[in-house]
Image (tube, helix red, strand yellow):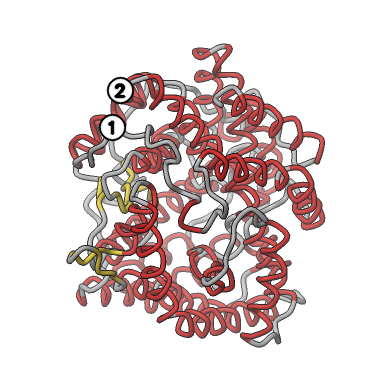
């Protein structure tokens, strides 16, 4: 028994080989339920008369999950890369509509066999995180919810479809929303105002569509929670996301602490920006611009230059990261630049079957694209590092850890910007802007999260009441230094910019939590680069085989949402920012 369940994952030299299957052929590629059902039949009929047989069942389960996740991932990636491609849309719809519900039903039966096995006590003792998550998943499962989840998966994609079709005309050129928004970083003020208002007009043209979409999604989410015995979707989702290491009350306390401790610093940042720009009034189109025109090199970078710059930064941090990124590039797992018909935002999707990750983003050629690529690179390296974990569940880390990987990578790269920027003034301006963005992002994240708390604890609200609630919440966290006169709709409908509200409800507060951890890691990195990177990689190799606090501790930092900890971290960031004035 000890031979199997006292398994300790040993750190090995990094391997980039595909997943090694024992029970399923390497070339197995299911397209229909008939291809998949025999494997579930095998899982449900395998004997569990010993610890060895339980391990065999878990091994086959991991192999099947690896294949199924890969098939869904490829379809999701395709439909995001080409939102107007009917074949890709049909393929994704078939998977999430016809196959995924059956997978969930059968996997529930498999999980039931595992947790009710005579050897489950040993499994719980030796792999408590795995057993906890299997039990939680089993307890939340309701057969009637499988079809609702299937419908949601398709309808959530509608946000990307709507936004991907929006374009604006600037100087005779048709630009995607992402491309146009990039002009707010560097264009003259009159051009920024024109572009901002054009983007706003386009967004307002679909505001009712997105309002109706969210209402429909919320109705379905309410039914999921109700079916599972919860009074609201907020409480259900907290449990569904596996937030065992902090409570809803902890999150609400964090909301208050951010308003008290971070918002005043955000006001100071924007007041200083207004002073630097010699403006009487700071408008929304003044918030993102390079206030000194010293940040970038003065030209848009090409895709090859963007990749080369990222490779240089990764190499300066750690040679393993450079090797991983070069491998993704050479193998064709990068889709970086914005285009019409491409979904908005960005992501890194792990593909554990082939031991790669797909990086998707909407670059436009600005220096900020590099930060997005470094961020998504952090996610991809995380997937490489935990690929040797024995169970598939251990490779899907909670977002508090996943975002730590990506946000820490951004701040590690911060220390090496001198490799890319032309002079000390550009370096100082970029570093200041990065730290400003980090501090300014936290109140926005909390506003979106608090808005979601209101949405799902007031399920009977009208569209008008929704906007009123958002305005009141956003007033608490937005800066009084920004004037919205004449573009009030930009304030009222600002929530519609946030993809997470539509596609991944309540996945967003983790960004603020992980940001605190990333700043703590950055503080350590500045003192001891090699030691910090070694601890960082050790933590990422754990995947989800330990609790979130244990993973943070392995990285050498605290997992802490308290006001006192928040103050210490934010004060450090503010001190570093003040050095750049």
Quadrant in the rendering for residue 200? bottom left
Where's residue 286, x and y in %? Answer: 48, 52
State if disc 2 and disc 1 touch (CB < 8 Å): yes
Circle nearer the N terminus (1, 2): 1
Q: Residue at x 37, y 58 (%)?
A: 190
Question: In the image, which disc is placed on residue 23?
Answer: none
Gap between marks 1 and 2, in whole Å? 7 Å
| In the foreground, 195 or 275 | 275
**Above/below status of 277 relative to 206:** above
* Residue topped by disc 2: 422
Q: Residue at x 43, y 27 (%)?
A: 413
| In the foreground, 115 or 130 | 130
Q: Is residue 109 visible?
A: no
Question: In the image, which disc is placed on residue 297?
Answer: 1
Q: Is residue 295 visible?
A: yes
Callout 2: few (<14), some (14-19), or many (20+) C-alpha neighbours within 10 Å? Answer: some
The quadrant in which the C terminus is found is top right
The quadrant in which the N terminus is found is top right
Quadrant in the rendering for residue 445? bottom right
Q: Secondary structure at mark 2?
A: loop
């Amino acid at each position: 028994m000890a031979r199997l369940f006292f398994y300790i994952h040993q750190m090995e030299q990094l391997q980039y080989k595909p997943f090694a299957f024992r029970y399923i052929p390497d070339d197995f590629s299911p397209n229909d339920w008939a291809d998949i059902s025999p494997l579930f039949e095998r899982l449900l009929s395998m004997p569990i008369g010993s610890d060895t047989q339980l391990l065999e069942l878990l091994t086959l389960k991991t192999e099947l999950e690896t294949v199924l996740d890969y098939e869904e991932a490829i379809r999701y990636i395709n439909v995001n890369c080409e939102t107007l491609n009917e074949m890709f849309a049909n393929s994704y719809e078939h998977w999430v509509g016809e196959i995924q519900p059956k997978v969930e039903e059968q996997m529930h039966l498999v999980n039931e066999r595992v947790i009710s096995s005579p050897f489950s006590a040993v499994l719980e003792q030796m792999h408590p995180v795995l057993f906890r998550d299997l039990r939680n998943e089993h307890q939340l499962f309701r057969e009637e919810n499988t079809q609702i989840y299937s419908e949601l998966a398709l309808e959530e994609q509608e946000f990307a479809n709507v936004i991907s079709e929006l374009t604006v005309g600037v100087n005779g050129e048709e630009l995607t929303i992402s491309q146009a928004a990039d002009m707010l970083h560097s264009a003259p003020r009159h051009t920024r105002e024109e572009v901002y208002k054009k983007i706003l007009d386009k967004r307002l043209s679909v505001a009712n569509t997105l309002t109706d979409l969210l209402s429909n999604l919320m109705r379905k989410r309410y039914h999921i929670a109700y079916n599972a015995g919860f009074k609201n979707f907020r409480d259900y989702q907290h449990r569904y996301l596996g937030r065992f290491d902090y409570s809803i009350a902890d999150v609400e306390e964090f909301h208050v602490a951010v308003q008290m401790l971070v918002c005043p610093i955000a006001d100071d940042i924007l007041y200083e920006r207004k002073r630097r720009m010699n403006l009487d009034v700071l408008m929304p189109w003044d918030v993102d611009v390079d206030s000194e025109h010293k940040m970038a090199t003065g030209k848009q970078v090409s895709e090859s230059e963007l990749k080369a710059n990222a490779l240089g930064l990764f190499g300066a941090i750690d040679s393993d990261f450079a090797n991983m990124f070069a491998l993704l590039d050479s193998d064709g797992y990068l889709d970086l630049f914005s285009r019409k018909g491409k979904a908005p935002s960005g992501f890194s999707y792990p593909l554990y079957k082939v031991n790669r990750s797909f990086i998707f983003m909407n670059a436009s050629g600005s220096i900020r694209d590099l930060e997005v690529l470094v961020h998504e690179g952090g996610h991809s390296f995380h997937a490489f590092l935990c690929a040797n974990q024995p169970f598939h569940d251990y490779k899907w880390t909670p977002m508090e850890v996943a975002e730590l990987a990506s946000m820490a990578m951004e701040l590690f790269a911060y220390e090496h910007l001198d490799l890319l920027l032309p002079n000390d003034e550009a370096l100082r301006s970029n570093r200041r802007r990065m730290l400003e963005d980090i501090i300014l992002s936290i109140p926005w994240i909390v506003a979106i999260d608090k808005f979601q708390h209101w949405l799902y604890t007031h399920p009977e609200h009208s569209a008008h009441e929704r906007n009123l609630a958002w305005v009141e919440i956003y007033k608490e966290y937005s800066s009084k230094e920004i004037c919205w006169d004449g573009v009030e709709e930009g304030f009222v409908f600002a929530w519609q910019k946030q993809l997470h509200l539509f596609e991944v409800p309540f996945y967003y507060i983790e960004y603020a939590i992980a940001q605190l951890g990333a700043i703590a890691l950055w503080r350590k990195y500045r003192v001891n680069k090699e030691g910090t990177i070694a601890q960082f990689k050790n933590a990422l190799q754990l995947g989800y085989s330990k609790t979130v606090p244990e993973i943070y501790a392995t990285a050498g930092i605290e997992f802490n949402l308290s006001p006192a900890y928040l103050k210490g971290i934010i004060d450090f960031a503010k001190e570093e920012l003040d050095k750049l004035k």
